[in-house]
Image (tube, grey):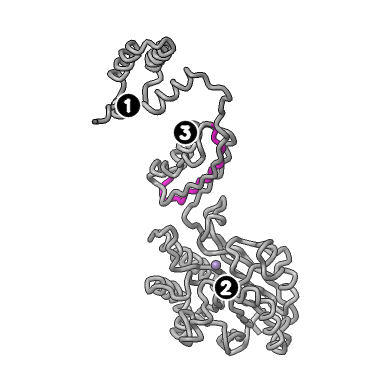
Amino acid sequence: MQEEVRWSHFSDVHLDYHQYNLIERFNDFFRGFDAAMTKALEHQPNFIVISGDLFEHHKPSPPAIRQAVYVLRKAKEKNIPVYVIAGNHDQSYSYIKRYGGDVLHFLNDLGLVIYLSGKNEILLHKNKNGEPIALLAGINYAGKLIGKKITDFVKRHNETLKKWEGKIPRILLLHAFIKECLPYNYELTSYELRQLPFDYIALGHYHGFWEDPEGKIFNPGSTEHRSTKEWGKESTRGLYNVTAHLNGKKIELDPKYVRYPVRKKVSIAKDFGTITKQELENEVKKILTENDEEGICLRVSITARVTDASAHMINLRQFKTLTTKTLITLIDQHITDTQLPTKKVVTLGEAIDDLLNMKYKINPNEIGEYHMLIENVLEMAKENNFNAIDEAFNHFLAKIKEPFADNTQPKEQ
Ligand SMILES: [Mn+2]
C-alpha cells in the first residue's frame, strides 16, 4: 500500500466565456485554466480533479475546445489523469439523451479526461502496480435534486465505500451550493456533506473560495473571476494541492490552497449622499482618472441623491471615456433626486424672468433690461395706452431672438 497520495483540485474554469464581448476576457479564462494546471503539475499529483463547469456552455466553440485540449495535454504527457464531472453550465441532459454524449464525453474519448458519470460514476485510481490508491466518485450537477441523487448514490455503492474506509482516500466530486457559501439559495448544508462516507469532498459551483473549518469539504472557487461579485481585494485565484498520508487505519489530509495571479479587477463603490449634479460629476471624473490603470477591469458603483437635477438627467456612463488604459470600465449608477424647491407665490417679475431665460434663452445678465420693458408695457396696458404698447412691443421684438419673432409673425390673410 502506497503511503502517500497526492492530488490537485480546482473548479469552474468556464472556458468559452466571452465576458463583456472581449477576446481578452475569453483568453483570460484560458489563462486561468493554464495557470491552475501549471500549479497542479508542480505538485506532481497522482491525479487531478475538476468539479464541474470546465466550459461555459454545453456546446463550446472549437477555439475553446482547443484551449481545453492544449491544457489537458500537459497532464496527459505526464500520465496524470484528470477526473471531471459536469456542472450546471456544461451539462445538458436532453442533449446527451438525444446525441449520446457531449464535449466531456468527447474529451473522455480522446483520453484527455475521465468523465465520472454513467458506469464510470465510481472508479478506483490505481498505481503502477495495479493497487488502488484512491476512490473517485462523481455526481453531476442536479440542482435541487442533488440531495436525493447523493443518497441514492451512497446506497448504490455503500459496500464499496465501506470497504475502502480508512484505507484509501475516498473523493467525491460535486457541483452544488452549500448553505455556508450561499445562505439564500443553497441545495445542501456542510453538515449533511460531512456525514457522507467520503474523506475529501471536492466541491464546485460557488465561485468564491470557502474554507471548511472541519477540513472535509473543499471549495477552491473559479479559476478566473466570472462575476463582479467575486472581485476581491486580491487579484488571485487558486486551487488545492493535497497530500494524503495513509497509515493503514486512518487518512490524514494535508491540503494546501495555492494562489496564482489573474488580471487585476478593481471595484469601487461610493455613496455621495446628497450632492449637486456638478459636484457628483466632478467626483466621478476624479475617481475614473485616479483609477485608470493599464489593463484592469474597473467597476465604479455610484449612489447619490442630487439636489438640482432629475435623476434621469444624470448619465455618469458618459465619463467612461476618461479611462483610456483600462481593459473595461463599468459604471453603475443608483441616483435619486430631491424634489426641486417650488415657491408657493411667484411674482409676475419672477415669472417673466423664468420665461425670458427658459423659453427665449436670454442671458440672465440681460434679463433686467427686458424685464423693465415688459413691466412698462404692463403699466401702459393698465392706462389703455395702446400706441405706446405697440411701440414698446416692436422695440422688444426687434431686440429679441429669432424664435419669439417667428411666433409673432402676423398670419397672412
Ligand atoms: Mn460555475
Q: Which stretch did the figure color magenta? A: 293-307
Above or below: residue 113 compared with residue 305: below
Residue position marked by numbered label 3 in the rendering: 282
| Circle 3 Cα neighbour tier, 10 Å, few/some/many (<14 / 14–19 / ≥20) | few
- Amino acid at pointer 2: Ser
Residue position marked by numbered label 1 in the rendering: 404
Whether pointer 1 and pointer 3 mark residues with C-beta atoms closer than 8 Å, the reply is no
On screen, residue 71 versus residue 232, left or right, reads left
| Circle 2 Cα neighbour tier, 10 Å, few/some/many (<14 / 14–19 / ≥20) | many
Above or below: residue 312 compared with residue 349: below
- Secondary structure of residue under mark 3: helix
Q: Nearer the viewer, residue 93 or 178?
A: 93
| Circle 1 Cα neighbour tier, 10 Å, few/some/many (<14 / 14–19 / ≥20) | few
Q: CA distance from mark 2 to mark 1?
A: 72 Å
- Secondary structure of residue under mark 1: helix
**Residue 177: x and y, percent?**
64, 68
Comparing labels 2 and 1, the label whose residue is closer to the camera: 1
Task: Please tell me whether residue 295 belongs to the stretch shown in magenta.
Answer: yes
Residue position marked by numbered label 2 in the rendering: 51
Above or below: residue 300 compared with residue 126: above
Task: Please tell me whether residue 327 belongs to the stretch shown in magenta.
Answer: no
Whether pointer 2 and pointer 1 mark residues with C-beta atoms closer than 8 Å, the reply is no
- Amino acid at pointer 1: Phe
Q: Nearer the viewer, residue 105 or 359?
A: 359
- Amino acid at pointer 3: Asn
